[in-house]
Amino acid sequence: GGMCGLAGILVPNAREPIDRGVLRRMTDSLLHRGPDGDGFYFGEGVALGHRRLSIIDVVGGAQPIFNEDRQVVTVFNGEIFNFRELTRELSGLGHRFATRSDTEVIVHAWEEWGEACVERFRGQFAFALWDARDATLFLARDRLGIKPLHYSILAGGRIVFGSELKAILRHPDVDRRLDPKAIEDYFAFGYVPDPKTIYSGVRKLPPGHTLCVRRGAGTEATPCEYWDLGDRQTHAGTERDLERELFERLGEAVSVRMLAEVPLGAFLSGGVDSSAVAGMMSRMSDGRIKTCSLGFEGAKTDERPYAQIVAREFGTDHADAEIAWPDGAPYWRLARIYDEPFADDSAYATERLCQYARRRVVVALSGDGADELLAGYRRYPWHLREERVRGLLPAWLRAGLFGPLGAVYPKLDWAPRPLRAQYTLRSLAGSALEGCARSLSIVPDEVRNRLFSRSLKRDLQGYRAIEALRPHWERTAGAHPLDRFQYLDIKTYLPGDILTKVDRASMAHSLEVRVPFLDHHFVEWASGIPAELRLANGVGKRILKRSLSGFLPDEILSRPKVGFSLPLDHWLAGPRLHVLRDFVMGRKLRELDLFNETAIEYVFSEHAGGRRDHGRLIWSLAAFAAFGEI
């Protein structure tokens, strides 16, 4: 296993030669994901490339890896944590293993169980497998989307695939036209949600999906879902029992992630989630575990003192640093790492944290996923309150009353976003899904409407970003409103924003990150916790905090949630704002003709004059402009 990079090409005609130079360039573009070596497989009409970062079976785990008669071959990015159990089971069924690596489990599991093999894997993975016996290509991505996989279907049914977009863009025939719908999604949510990418011709394989193509079968290459959170079976038992069980199950998910032949540590923000993970690791580890945290120059909140409390409590080997605004603009570096527009400003913070951590460890555990799973975000209690109000009034009255009020009511920019009256009044005017879409949006509909050019609006043909949420929303009809919103986040924000941010930021520095809260056994179990134990009296993650009481210090459990984001108000002020304005108004974006320049000028002047806080919109525009320049 190990955090690696993979790339490949499949052509429908087995005799058509594949350009080895192109595959090598695709694979080399992923050097950062795997600095320890590369490997290639060239078969009939198929080619696979791999870049390796050695974590498990450092000696024997070089890829590609084959089955006994070399008819099945795989390239793999990730970790399969139950590989020892699977190796025993498959050996008992007569399979012969040549290595002690988790990668080899994939080829034998495919021989034994076919496409269902993914259901047996516990871990984080993306892999491509070629079976020469019936000329089958099989692509798979883990259940929650921890590891990425992109693909493009070219003219004549050729398929190109790779861990990151940059690998696919190395192929000369990939369609590089921008997808207008992806631009609308990006400015709404700050990222391009699965299965779209910013390019019309390239897709992301969605989490929990596989793609199976048999040469000559003439079938469409359509992703197939093998896992979904499914219907929640609410657990019986007392609150105390569930708290105890949560603690045990989380501990087990942490312990299986401590398998490595290289230095292992944890990110420690001083929040509940990362503190729980670091604390559990410390309790299970013989030596002191290494932990890292960061602070930002000019930030209103500094998490480092909290991280230090936890580090002292568990005796970790802790280090922290402060980050100033970089000399070079950070969005350049981020555009090259993310390959498509990505506006989450914590991406820069995360990338710096990974760079810092990599000096000390090769594998780090993080607390990501807890907020989505156990209802930690402030948007959840707010949504439930809005839902109660919506339930009291008929829709026609809500739209007639709150719609016009929202349009004239002055926008309270100084208030925390959920408390701004205009947002709330407009949210109440719409449906529950519209309320969710609004609270997930970093740039509201009416601002996007002013921002986009006539030609972009024409290309959008009325498409709105809410449509990217609708299919997930409709799958949970009749469920509790909290369950619906969390499901929506687990399907969109979690893989599209959080996990993308962590994967690209860590891999840019060849650091592997593991996420115990997203162990699928833990996720399935946690989804059955009654809503009122996840969120009570407006307090999120209640059951998690109660289960950790006595384990974590009280000042950690009682502090309010703080997001890991940059002090944009401090960083986007004065001369820096003018530099940014010139950059965003530059020639390249003008040529794309996507934006209304007057509106952009207005956004900058409002922000500079302190009339409105457009920090996130300006950051989003800068990230988009930097993407346009790479």
Image: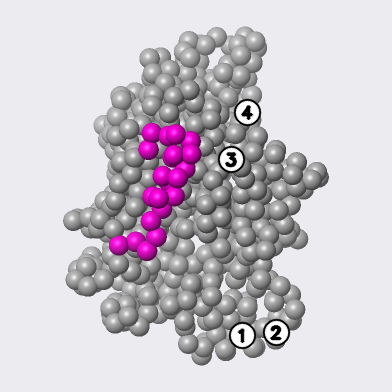
Question: How far is mark 1 from mark 2, CA to CA?
Answer: 10 Å
Tell me which residue sits at (39%, 60%) in the image: 301
Inspect the image, locate mark 3, and give the three-letter code of the amino acid beneath it. Answer: Phe
Q: Residues within 10 Å of mark 2 (few under 14, many from 20)?
A: few
Mark 3 touches mark 2? (CB < 8 Å): no
- Separation of disc 1 and disc 4 at Cα? 50 Å
Q: Residues within 10 Å of mark 1 (few under 14, many from 20)?
A: some
What residue does disc 3 label?
551
Above or below residue 257? Residue 493 is below
Q: Secondary structure at mark 2?
A: helix
Q: Nearer the viewer, residue 454 or 142?
A: 142
Q: Which residue is mark 4?
A: 120
Q: Report, in whole angstroms, how far the alpha carbon at label 1 lies from the one at label 3.
A: 46 Å
- Which three-letter amino acid code belongs to the residue tagged 2? Trp
The reply to whether residue 328 is in sight is: yes
Nearer mark to the viewer, of 3 and 4:
3
- Disc 1 or disc 4, which is closer to the eye? 1
* Amino acid at circle 4: Arg
Residue pointed to by mark 1: 402
Residue picked out by circle 2: 396
Whether residue 43 appears in this view of the structure is no
Magenta extent: 298-318
Q: Position of residue 370 (x, y in %)?
A: 56, 48
Q: Residue furthest right?
A: 236
Of the image marks 3 and 2, the number of the one nearer the N terminus? 2
Label 2 or label 4, whichever comes before in sequence order = 4
Left or right: 600 as drawn, with respect to 135: left
> Where residue 237 sits in the image (x, y, percent)?
80, 43
